[in-house]
Image (spheres, helix red, strand yellow):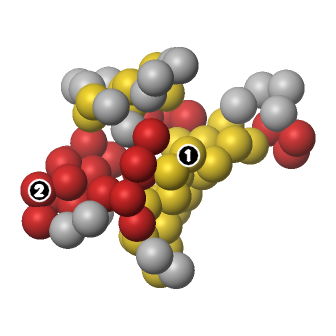
Amino acid sequence: MPNIKDLLNKIKWTKDLEKVKIWYLHRGAPNDTKILSGADIKKINRSSLETETSNIPYHRIFKIFYGDKIIFKR
């Protein structure tokens, strides 16, 4: 399975990043989980995703959907 950075870059350049939903660990949120829309991604960095308000390290991401299909799961 490709790493998260490569997977998201492939979607960014060949498909529609706005169809992506990223589930990640966020301590203090309900169930310690937040969901990020691909439309909120400003930059795909070497070790994290950058949004308007935060950086999300890849090791906190545990599930990625493209549409209604799971494309990554830990």
Residue nearer the viewer, 49 or 51: 51
Residue placed under numbered mark 2 in the picture? 13
Residue 31 position in % (x across, y down): 86, 44
Please report the residue visible at 71 percent of the width from the left and 31 percent of the height from the top: 26
* Quadrant in which residue 15 is drawn: bottom left
Query: So how many labels did they put on this image?
Result: 2
Please tell me which residue is depicted at 44% across the width and 27% down the height of the picture. Answer: 51
Name the residue at the left extreme: 13
Decide which of 3, 52 is in the foreground and name it: 52
Question: Is residue 59 shown left or right of residue 13?
Answer: right
Residue 46 in the image: state x and y as whole percent.
23, 25
Residue at 50% across, 51% down: 37
The answer, for residue 74, to whether it is visible in the render is no
Of the 4 image quadrants, the one containing the N terminus is: bottom left
The reply to whether residue 37 is in sight is yes
Residue beneath disc 1: 36
Sequence-wise, the earlier of marks 1 and 2 is 2
Secondary structure at numbered mark 1:
strand
Residue type, numbered disc 2 = Trp
Cα separation, mark 1 vs mark 2, equals 19 Å
Structural crowding at the residue carrying mark 2, measured as other residues with C-alpha within 10 Å and reported as few (<14), some (14–19) or many (≥20): few
> What residue occupies the far bottom of the structure in this picture?
68
Residue at 48% of width from left, 67% of height from top?
65
- In front of the other: 54 or 71: 54
Q: Residues within 10 Å of mark 1 (few under 14, many from 20)?
A: some
Residue 48, compared with residue 14, is above or below; it is above
Labels 1 and 2 touching (C-beta < 8 A): no
Q: Is residue 47 above or below residue 20?
A: above
What's the amino acid at mark 1?
Leu
- 4 lies left or right of 73: left
